[in-house]
Image (cartoon, coloured by chain):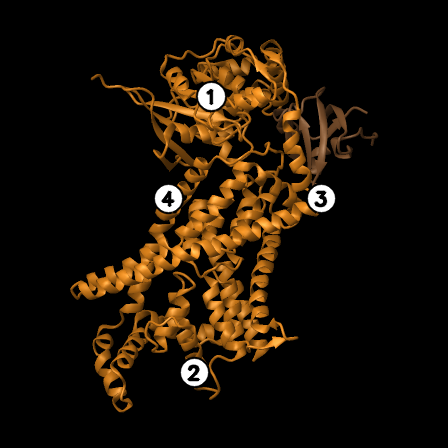
Chain colours: A brown, B orange
Amino acid sequence: MAARSKSVASMKPGETAVISGFTDEQLSVKLLEMGFLPGTVVRFNFSAPFGDPVCVNVSGFDLSLRLEEADTISILD
Amino acid sequence: MAYKKRMKIALVGKPNSGKSSLFNQLTGLNQKIGNFPGITVDKRMGFCQLDETTSAEIIDLPGIYSLYPRTLDEKIVVEILTNRNDENFPDRLAVIADATNLKNCLLLLTQLIDLGLPVVLALNMMDLAAKSGLSLDVKKLSKELDVPVVMINARQGLGLDALKKQLIEDIQPSSRRIFKPLDEVVFAVEEIQKHFSLSTSYEAFQYLQQSENLLFLSKEDRIFIKEVATRQNFFPHKYQGAETIHRYGFIQKVLDTVIIKSARQEWKSASNKLDKILTHKVWGYLIFFTLLFLIFQSVFALAQIPMDAIDRGFADLSGFLNKRLPEGPLFELISSGIVPGIGGIIIFIPQIAILFAFISILEETGYMSRVVFLMDKIMRKFGMSGRSVVPLMSGLACAIPAIMATRTIDNWKDRLITIFVTPLMSCSARLPVFAILVALIVPEERVLGFISLQGVALMGLYLLGFLAAMFSALLMKAIIKVNERSYLIMEMPTYRMPKWSNVGYTIVEKTKAFVFEAGKIIIAVSIILWVLASYGPKEVMDNARATVQSESYNLRLTEEGFENRVAAYKLEHSYAGIMGKWMEPVIRPLGFDWKIGIALITSFAAREVFVSTIATIYSLGSTDDNLTIKERLKDEINPETGGPRFTPAVGFSLLVFYTFAMQCMSTLAIVKRETKGWKWPLIQLVYMTGLAYVSGLIVYQVLS
């Protein structure tokens, strides 16, 4: 298996990154609709007390994602 | 005056865009909830006077981000908007967009434009947008989209006149076509468009993309669409990602030309600071549980006053009618069957209203999504979601509003599990039953001087109910297979003050739904139970007085004592009594006799009826004085053993039985309503009764 690129799940609070793509096709259509577009900036706001879910900001609004959902969003290193 | 057709206007927009506020502003209390035919979604609609001569029917469609649905509720939107022959097909659409978050809101609008629908864009929250420093060229936006744009403030009701005026006008569909199906699928789309004579190619594209969601299509239509798709190499769902990216590309271009000054993020800083505390790993949970505790307390304490008044009022009314109405079975049915039945519905209103007031405030402020955020991980282990927390906790007050509150759970499996296990949480109706039995069998002693044993027993029962709920959820999680994936891609709205009129509308809506939907079944079953408990084989009942008189000839009863004996005799020989005796072999392994059997039957209407039935059957008249009942139960002898009837084994068996059993037809009625069918309430009834029976059996056999 090829080395996976970094995902939103691995980000730290306050960190920003650029979305490069998705690893789950079924989920990607929902994520796209919510504004997770390749090339846009995503900011990791904070995570819930047990590390899951997480809150991120994308296209100007705050969203919560489960860690497994965040893990399907690849980011540029 | 010329007859004017009533216009149909549909409100569409994403969740949290102010759609409900706008709907409430337009329709006021002129709202009603109906059903969309053949689908399990409530249809919220109301009426609005647009000008002196035109009135409109406003349909509030579920909040959606795009035409591609994620939940059952959302499917209705694409279903309605692609079926021009449907009676619900709107003449106009008002798309509500949150101006502070325009990009996301415009996605849906571009799809509606491509469907060729007459839309008006209502830009909401312009005040917040202005506060954030955002400055828009609204005229240009309207021109770029070729759609009329109106600025409104749905919370304060500003701009509504302009919106109404715009809606009356002859609105032409936008001339823009934003997304064109790719070249590779053009033939498939053309063929479908021609076959069904559709006005836009995007509509045909939707037929191909999601025919399974368009319930109005006939089986033949569907087969035809499938056949075309296969023949022309059209792969449904393959094109959705590309479509979304294309639309966002268009939106970005439009926004680049109309945004004069973009928003700063600082206006959210207060909200972000609040989140630091409210989702903190210690403070977050502490604040949440404190809030829950307060809500729970208020539902109990605040509701108690009106509930007592209602209880007394209906008892008085029933007694008054009993005295005033002429004798006869019909009048007795009214005074002793129907009036208490109605009382049994009305009594829940205070709890429902107060609970929904709190839930609505939590929703309005944006805190609810933080609760979901905090609890999601834990709840998911049990097959539920973060959104299940509030319904479960509400179940401690009353399962009825709690099950109604599961509407906020968008995943069907999560919601079903939550509905299924909520009645296991010990509700306030179990408390009177618990109180009397615990007082009877648990000694009034204190351990270490301050821990009351009775208190511990009571707490244990609550804990038992909670554990049973969690265990059942795990079981359901393993059993139910649903293809629908569970998502938590959820917006975290900025905190704001609740809009009080929206809170009010929610209370009215939920209360009305309960009274009219569950009420019908509750009344019907109350009447049946009343008939069972008051009628029996004619001969025995007619001779009740004489028989009791001859039996108790030597007892020198007071007149009241005599009447109480007659009542007990009548209940014993009524159909309910016969059923109780008939049931005895079944419930004997649990330690119950036929007298308890009768109480089990009558308390099926509502658990608290157990106490009054026990009072009647032990010839205590209609007392609800716990002390009297307790003393009487203590003295009851078990003829087989010669010892007391209510041994600890019987008492605990009965307590466990009431903890688990679905002794509440109102809950069944509401589960039927929420799951739109009898399947789940019946499974629930069998499961809970089975669990209660087996647990009672084990407890009795082990303890005795």
Question: Distance between the Cα atoms at labels 2 and 4?
Answer: 44 Å
The residue under label 2 is B636
- Which amino acid, by three-letter code, is at mark 2? Glu
Q: Residue at x 45, y 36 (%)?
A: B502
Q: Chain of mark 1?
A: B
Q: Is residue B151 above or below residue B505?
A: above
Residue B233 lies, with reference to residue B322, above or below; the image says above
The quarter of the rendered structure image containing the N terminus of chain A is: top right
Which residue is identified by label 1? Answer: B152
Residue B560, picture quadrant: bottom left
According to the image, label 4 marks what residue?
B512
- Dot 4, crowdedness within 10 Å: few (<14), some or many (≥20)? some
Please name the residue that numbered disc 3 is placed on. A49
Q: Comparing marks 1 and 4, which lies closer to the viewer? A: 1
Q: How many residues crowd around disc 1 within 10 Å: few (fewer than 14), some, or many (20 or more)?
A: many
Q: Nearer the viewer, mark 2 or mark 3?
A: 3
For the residues tagged 1 and 4, is the chain the same? yes
> Label 1, label 2: how many angstroms apart (C-alpha)?
71 Å
Rendered residue at 36%/70% (across/down): B579
> Is residue B604 placed above or below B417 in the rendered structure?
below
Instruction: Please state if B433 lies on the left or on the right of B478 as rendered.
Output: left
